[in-house]
Structure formats: C-alpha cells, structure tokens
Image (tube, rainbow, N blue to C red):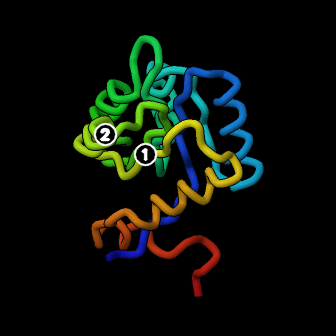
C-alpha cells in the first residue's frame, strides 16, 4: 500500500449549526486541520471554487441537496473529481454504508460519535485507505521533512 498523502484541508458539510460549530472547532483547534464548514451542498459547491480540500466530510441527511447528491455534484468539478470522502452521518446501517462505498466513500463515521475521538477516526480512515501509488508520489513528503 502506498503512503497516504498529507491530510490538511477538509471541506465539511453539515446542516445542523450546533454540530457544524462543534466539529469545526474540534478539527481546527484540536486537530489543526484547515477546515471550511458549509451549511448546505449548494454552499459547498460555491466553496470549492476557491478552496481545494484534501478530504470531503459530508453529512447525508440535509434539506435540499443531501450528502450523496452533494458528492455527485462535487464529482462533476475538476477540483473535487477524486477527492476522498468520509460520510459523518446517523444513516449508517449496513446497506447505507455499502451504498456510500459505491459512491467512492473511503469511510463512514456514525452519529452520534465521540468528539474526543473524531480527529483520530478521520486519520485512521485516511491512513487505512488504499492509496494509488501515483497519487501518493505526486503529493510528495509532508512539509517540513525536506532534506
């Protein structure tokens, strides 16, 4: 298995404002990720015009454009065509997780989740993903490790 590329920038889409605030705070302040938090799929589509995420973190059950529809729309854009996605959702029955996998999800984190473990769970999924050798080589070593 190839070495995973560095994970820094996350596009997080969640319609629940309290949860969005909590997760954003955890990922930015505790985990030191660069996060753009969006309240809807439509907002996410606007955000990727100026932000290129390493990872998409999507809720599923949202009004208007749900998480799977958001992912399908993001896949139509060059910048997010192959961006890995993790669904953070209460819709995590076996058949639902299997469906997300067919959409290319690298993992699912079920709600409710342990806030203290969220960053670790995201990193575990990221590092356990089977990365194509070419993508990992393109990204090179993490910053600060150059000779």
Does the image show residue 124? Answer: yes
SS for dot 1:
strand
Mark 1 Cα shell of 10 Å, populated few (<14), some (14-19), many (≥20): many
Residue 13 at what x, y percent from top left?
52, 30
Residue 60 drawn above or below residue 139? above
Does the image show residue 78? Answer: no
User: Residue lying furthest front in this view?
Assistant: 93
Q: Is residue 107 left or right of residue 98?
A: right
Q: Please name the residue that numbered disc 2 is placed on.
A: 100
**Residue 24, quarter of the rendered image:** top right
Residue 5 at what x, y percent from top left?
45, 66
Query: Quick check: marks 2 and 1 in contact, CB under 8 Å?
Result: yes
Q: Is residue 93 left or right of residue 132?
A: right
Q: Please name the residue that numbered disc 1 is placed on.
A: 108
Mark 2 Cα shell of 10 Å, populated few (<14), some (14-19), many (≥20): many
Q: Quadrant of the C terminus?
A: bottom right
In the foreground, 33 or 127: 127
Q: Is residue 103 left or right of residue 61?
A: left
Residue 61 at what x, y percent from top left?
44, 22
In the foreground, 55 or 94: 94
Query: For the point 32% across and 76% down, which residue is it?
Result: 1
């Amino acid at each position: 298995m190839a070495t995973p590329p560095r994970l820094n920038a996350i596009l997080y889409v969640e319609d629940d404002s309290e949860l969005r605030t909590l997760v954003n705070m955890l990922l930015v302040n505790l985990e030191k990720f660069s996060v753009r938090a969006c309240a809807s799929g439509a907002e996410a589509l606007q955000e990727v015009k100026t932000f290129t995420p390493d990872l998409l973190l999507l809720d599923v059950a949202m009004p208007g454009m749900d998480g799977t529809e958001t992912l399908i729309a993001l896949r139509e854009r060059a910048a997010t065509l192959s961006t890995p996605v993790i669904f953070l959702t209460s819709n995590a029955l076996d058949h639902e997780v299997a469906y997300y996998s067919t959409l290319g999800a690298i993992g699912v984190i079920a709600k409710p989740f342990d806030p203290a473990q969220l960053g670790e769970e995201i990193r575990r999924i990221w590092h356990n993903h089977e990365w194509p050798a070419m993508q990992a080589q393109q990204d090179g070593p993490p910053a600060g490790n150059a000779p």
